[in-house]
Amino acid sequence: MALLLFVSGGSHVVFGQKEVRQYSRKGTKLYKKKEYSKAEIEYRKALEINPNDKVSNYNLANTLYSTKRGEEAMKLYASLMETQKNSPGEKADVAHNLGNVFMSDKKYEEAIQAYKESLRARPDDEETRYNLALAQKLLEQQKQQQQQQQQQKQDDKQQENQDQNKDQQNNELQQDQQEKKEDKTQQQEDPSEEKMSKDNAQKILEAFLKDEKDTQKKVDKAKQLRSRSGKNKKQW
């Protein structure tokens, strides 16, 4: 990631700008050694003197990005794009780096816009052109993946509903089978009760017939006795 360097514009130096340059240049040396924490300290010292210093702000943003603090770097790059009067090259660098921050956050649509902005300022930048093509490809893949995830979510929901319906049908079937089983058990019990009733009725009938037979015997015997009595009766 390229850093901005101070370019001398003559012997006239704005009050305090000399210290700003010293801190910023020291920060740049540390940045190139990948001593990012120390570099950040130097850039912030420069910005304490001149908060609007373009070079220190830009290089601080690069340092933040290099230390995986993309959100802070993005805000600083965006601020530079909006508030600073940048040369075409500076604008291209800021937009390019802003695109890189968006890429690292998988915000491919925003990255595409940033790279396009960079190419408008510097059309022949092959690295930016490559990054733009990559961002477009990754955006397409991201959309396809989101569609697949959405379809999978719908399929899972449909399968869940089918499983619930199947469980309900199984419960209803089990309940129906249980009711049929209970009815069958009841039917098996009823013939036994009916048989017992028939047996009781048969016994009652037999007892009745026996009593009737005994009664008939008694009647016949009485008739015989009366008949005998009639024969032995004396005539007057």
Image (cartoon, rainbow, N blue to C red):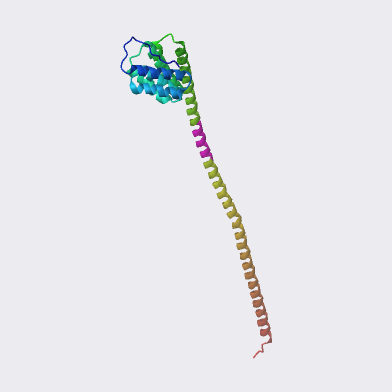
> Can you see residue 113?
no
Q: Nearer the viewer, residue 166 or 37?
A: 37
Type of secondary structure dominating the magenta stretch: helix
For image coordinates 46% across by 10% down, the residue present is: 126
| Quarter of the N terminus within the rendering | top left
The picture quadrant where one finds residue 109 is top left
Front residue of 183/18: it is 18
Residue 191 position, x and y percent, is 61, 57
**Front residue (pair 1, 101):** 1
Is residue 163 magenta-colored? yes
Q: Among all residues in the image, which is located at the extreme bottom? A: 236
Point 35% across, 16% down: residue: 18
> Residue visible at 37% across and 17% down?
21
Would you say 149 lies left or right of 16 here?
A: right
Quadrant position of the C terminus in the picture: bottom right
Look at the image and give the residue range highlighted in magenta. Answer: 155-166
Q: Is residue 41 magenta?
A: no
Residue located at (37% from left, 23% from top): 45
Note whether 60 is above or below 224 in the view shown: above
**Residue 127 in view in this figure:** yes
Q: Where is residue 188 shown, x and y percent of the image? A: 61, 55
Q: Quadrant of residue 92?
A: top left
Q: Nearer the viewer, residue 201 or 107?
A: 107
x, y (%) of residue 98? 41, 19
Q: How many marks?
A: 0
What percent of the width, then of the height, locates residue 211? 63, 73
Q: In the figure, 106 relative to 125: above or below?
A: below
Taking the image as shown, residue 149 lies to the left or right of residue 232, namely: left
